[in-house]
Image: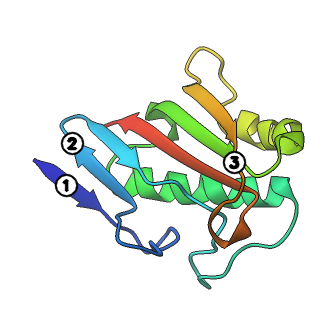
Amino acid sequence: MNKTILTSNAAQPIGPYNQAVAHGDLIYTSGQIPVDPATGQMVTGDIRAQTEVVLQNLKAILEAAGSGMNRVLKTTVFLQDMNDFAAMNEVYGKVFADKATAPARSTIQVARLPKDAKVEIEAVASL
C-alpha cells in the first residue's frame, strides 16, 4: 500500500501530485525545484543557490518519510543548461561527499523546467 509523504518543511506541490510516495521500503520523491518552503517563492540566484534549496527540500521530504539523504539510492537531475553542470555538481557533491555511499545519478538537460527553474532533482531512497 502506498503512503503519501507531505511536509511543510519543503516546497508545496504546484499541481496534482505529492511531494513523495512511500511503497514498501522505498520512497519516490517528486522532482523538487528551488522554491523556498517558508515563502512559497522561487529562489533567485545562480545554479549553486538553486541547487542548495532543491537539496534542502529533498532532505526535508525524506526526513518526513523516516529516511534521509544517506539512504538515497538514485537521483535524476534535470538542468535547464548543461553548462551549469560543474557548479551544480559542486553543491551536489557536498551533500553526497562519500563516494562509497553516493547514489546512482542521471543528469539530463531539458528545454524548460517549472517556474523557469535552473534545476530540478528527484530521488528514490530506502526507508
Residue type, numbered disc 1: Lys
Q: CA distance from mark 3 to mark 1?
A: 30 Å
Residue positioned most to the top: 100
Looking at the image, do the residues carrying marks 2 and 1 touch, with CB atoms under 8 Å apart? Answer: yes
Q: Tell me where residue 32 appears, x and y as whole percent.
A: 55, 58
Residue type, numbered disc 2: His
Query: Which residue is denoted by mark 3 in the rendering?
Result: 110
Would residue 46 be found to the left or right of residue 57 on screen?
Answer: right
Judge by depth and name the residue closer to the eye, 77 or 70.
77
Q: Residue 56's quadrant in the figure?
A: bottom right
For label 2, count other residues whose C-alpha is less than 10 Å away and answer few (under 14), some (14-19) or many (20+): some
Q: Residue 87's quadrant in the figure?
A: top right
Q: Earlier in the sequence, mark 3 or mark 2?
A: 2
Would residue 62 be found to the left or right of residue 3 on screen?
Answer: right
In this picture, is 56 found above or below 99? below
Judge by depth and name the residue closer to the eye, 118 or 98.
118
Q: Quick one: SS at disc 1?
A: strand
In this picture, is 36 found above or below 106? below
Q: Tell me where residue 51 appears, x and y as whole percent.
A: 73, 53
Q: CA distance from mark 2 to mark 1?
A: 7 Å
Q: Tell me where residue 121 appears, x and y as whole percent.
A: 59, 48
Query: Which residue is denoted by mark 1 in the rendering?
Result: 3
Residue type, numbered disc 3: Val
Q: Residue at x 32, y 48 (%)?
A: 66
Query: Which residue is denoted by mark 2 in the rendering?
Result: 23
Q: Earlier in the sequence, mark 2 or mark 1?
A: 1
